[in-house]
Image: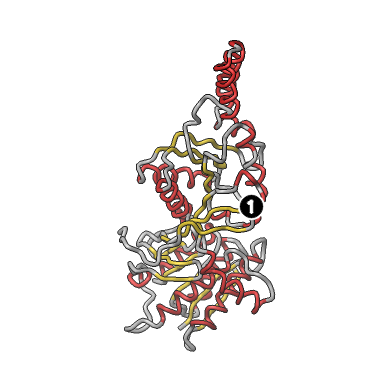
Amino acid sequence: MKVGILVPLSGPQGEIGAALLDAAQMALFDIGDKNLTLLPRDTGGTPEGAARAAKEVLDAGVRIILGPLLAPDVAAVAPVARAAGVEVVAFSNDRMVAGPGVYVMGLLPRDQVARVVSYAVSQGRSRFAALVPDTPFGTAVADALRSSAAADNAIVTDIQTYTPGTDVSEVVRRLANYDARKAAFDAQLSALEAKGDEVSRQAAARLKAAGSTEDLGFDAVMIPEGGERLRSIAPLLPYYDIDTDKVRLLGTSLWNDVSLGTEPALLGGWFAAPDPRARADFVARFATLYGHRPHGLASLGYDATALAAVLARGSHGPDFSNAALTAAHGFTGVDGLFRFHPDGLSERGLAVLEIQRGELKVVSPAPEAFTTVVY
């Protein structure tokens, strides 16, 4: 049984492609049947290269295709694979390329946002705002925030967008309604101080301690950024009088970085991601085998290959059909529980983690089983 795996081994994404292939070979060794063979092909990170690679593995008789990585490459492979009646499990997280016979395995913004919003609501949050980049990813996060909040009987009061790579100070200032709130604060404080009596002095002291007279209109803010970009945005919130001790910051799996705990404004922030405890063994074994830690996306290569190995050992023989791939119970991989729906979208069982100094603490564990069937 031949399984094609299409990854960018050359070009700008070559490092990621190599990690995906290394992890796939690791899964084949761990789980694969001796009759299961991986046929890797380099897509070059281009749609043309991906389509050519797909034709090569299909001509070689593969039963299923794993990959490619990039959304345009998946779109190029899809018609070739459909014409041959072969299913595709892609490493992309772009829902636009999913469809019948093409399943996207990457972590979707929808799942991340829905999970962390649901947890935030369970912890008493009910009014959400967001700072999102003006990108397809930012738009997906904003749409997911609106639908997730509505599903949990919460509301979205404000979404501010910004151009990637630009200074977001004015955008945060607008989100905070800083000018109006400061003017109201200054006016009230001046009035109290002008009275001069003891009661007014005590009221002025309380007002100074509170720092504001106006409610922000939200008690949680979604910021779908990571790394240095997130570190530059987070301190602007307290600077413009968004008290991050009272307003909970929320993120995506881009926050899955223990070093973020050095930024005070992010402490206590929540985000949804695969449970890191489930991934720890994979990371350690990968490092032992290959001499370095795996790229963050490498686990997709492992889980896709493990999935193919499991389907190859079906009780009635190898079964890579739509029905097998969309089994309601799903599958368990390095990144936890996942399943595919007939529309090609994936669903994942995610944990909620909290940023603390020196660690990312799991505050709500990932589910051990899917309890509902969406379709």
- Indicate left or right for 267 with 102 as reference: right
Q: Residue furthest bottom?
A: 34
Whether residue 134 is visible to the viewer of this picture, yes or no, is no
Q: Position of residue 258 (x, y in %)?
A: 62, 57
Task: Specify the quadrant that holds the C terminus.
Answer: bottom left
In this view, the residue in front, 11 or 277, is 277
Residue shown at the point (43%, 71%) measured from the top left = 332
In this view, the residue in front, 328 or 177, is 177
- Judge whether 269 appears above or below 37 on screen: above
Q: Secondary structure at mark 1?
A: helix
Q: Residue furthest top?
A: 195
In this view, the residue in front, 5 or 305, is 305
Q: Residue furthest front?
A: 198
Whether residue 302 is visible to the viewer of this picture, yes or no, is yes
Looking at the rendered structure, the kind of residue marked 1 is: Leu
- Indicate left or right for 30 with 154 as reference: right
Task: Specify the quadrant that holds the N terminus.
Answer: bottom left
Residue shown at the point (37%, 59%) measured from the top left = 343
Q: Position of residue 247 (x, y in %)?
A: 52, 39
In this view, the residue in front, 130 or 21, is 130
Residue shown at the point (41%, 81%) measured from the top left = 312
- Judge whether 191 appears above or below 147 on screen: above
Q: Residue furthest right?
A: 291
- Judge whether 281 appears above or below 254 on screen: below
Q: In terms of image quadrants, where is residue 177?
A: top right
Q: Position of residue 201 (x, y in %)?
A: 59, 18
Q: In terms of image quadrants, where is residue 371?
A: bottom left
Which residue was labeled with disc 1?
260
